Amino acid sequence: GCWDTITLKLTINNALNSQFSAQVCGSYNLPWNQVVSTSGDYTHTYLAVSGCDSVVTAHVTISTVSLVTSNITSCAQADLTLGSVTSGSDPGLTFTYWTDATGTIPLSNPSSVGAGTYYIKATNANGCFAIKPVTVFINDTPKFVVTNPAAVCAPATVDLTSSGITAGSDPGLTYTYWLDSLNTNPLTNPQSVGVTGIYYIKATAAGGCTFVKAVEVIVKINESIPGMRYPTVVTDPYMPTQLGARDLGSNYSYLWRPPVGLNVFSSKNPIFNYNIETQYTIIIRPPDGTCPTVDTLLVALRQRACHPVIDVPKAWSPNGDGHNDKLRPLTIDITELKYFRVFNRWGQLVFETNIIAEGWDGIYNGRAQVMDVYTWTLEAKGCDGQYYKRAGNSALMR
């Protein structure tokens, strides 16, 4: 039934609450040794010796950099600074270029690099960065050759699609033709260019690489010297006669057509020696080979009178000395021998021919005939179209 009174003095301390904010790159190590890599609020309760606790709240913002790089396939030097290389990355990034993965050795000329692997460092406004590699592939450069075409004289035109203009280039290239070096204005008639100027040929390789080269076209207008007809030259058949073209200047070339009857067809002053009347075309070209002058010259032959003559010697001596060994007709202006026949004194035919200048050597049936008087007859056609008959006697002498 006894009782007592105990007095308890109780002190209640309020719990301690605190918070802080942190903005970091990549990940953050909280004070209580927790590593976080995403943004958010993180809370931790501390317990004091007295048994009281305190709560700490960390407001963490993780700043990340999204960097996307695309490898480059180029036909020549590549440009790493092009927007297409980092397309898809976060906006507002600042890019720097390096030769090593840690970003310590800067790339001196990122806008013109060869084949290889390089590194792009992207930094955002908070100073956070990411580094990623980019690889450059350089296609083999094809051989592309353009040779200016020869100048032409209007109305002639130049065919830029001619294989001779790109001769020496690698096979498999595709060509297009343009009025400007940027290839914005196509040339609509590359097969027939009639205006002097600089044009452009674009070659495209199988891998898509393109190359552009200039080509010069020269079309000369109104530069030909008018042709003329020379006075007719009259000469005799097979009489060497010097002809002459006019002198238009030094280093001009000459070509005579048709190529008959002359000793040299590329001379300014050839020699005519022919038996047919001929009209020549003389092509005279200047040193650059364009805009030729075309002259004409007629070489006419004198027409001599037609006087058919037939004579048969009164005697012949077939002794093999090379003089008068055969009995034959001697002719002038005779175009055809119908026959020449020789008979002995008994009327026996011992020789016959229809070939002019062929004669009898005094042999019949393989035996030399005796000295005697032989009778001959002939018929021949003259240059006047008339037929002539002759007959007579000739003595065989040994």
Image (cartoon, helix red, strand yellow):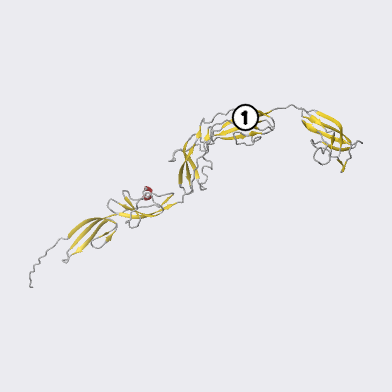
Structural crowding at the residue carrying mark 1, measured as other residues with C-alpha within 10 Å and reported as few (<14), some (14–19) or many (≥20): many
Residue lying at the far right of the rendered structure: 346
Residue 301 is left or right of residue 268, and the answer is: right
Q: Where does the image place residue 84, in percent across and percent down from the top left?
A: 38, 48
**Quadrant occupied by the N terminus:** bottom left
Count of residue discs: 1
Frontmost residue, 35 versus 283: 283
The residue positioned 27% from the left and 61% from the top of the image is 35
The C terminus, quarter of image: top right
Name which quarter of the figure residue 231 lies in: top right
Image coordinates of residue 385 in percent, x first then y, are 78, 28
User: x, y percentage for residue 65?
Assistant: 31, 53
* Residue at image coords 87%, 35%: 395
The amino acid at mark 1 is: Leu
Q: For residue 305, what is the image quadrant?
A: top right
Q: How far across and how far down the image is residue 214, in percent?
A: 46, 41
What residue is at 42 percent from the left and 53 percent from the top? 137
Query: Which residue bears the numbered disc 1?
Result: 297
Q: Between residues 6 and 123, which one lies in front from this camera angle?
A: 123
Task: In the displayed orientation, state which residue is furthest to the bottom.
Answer: 1
**236 left or right of 356 in image:** left
| Left or right of 142, for residue 36 | left
Which residue occupies the foreground of this view, 392 or 355? Answer: 392
Residue 63, picture quadrant: bottom left
- Compared with 244, 83 (above or below) is below
Is label 1 in a helix, a strand or a loop?
strand
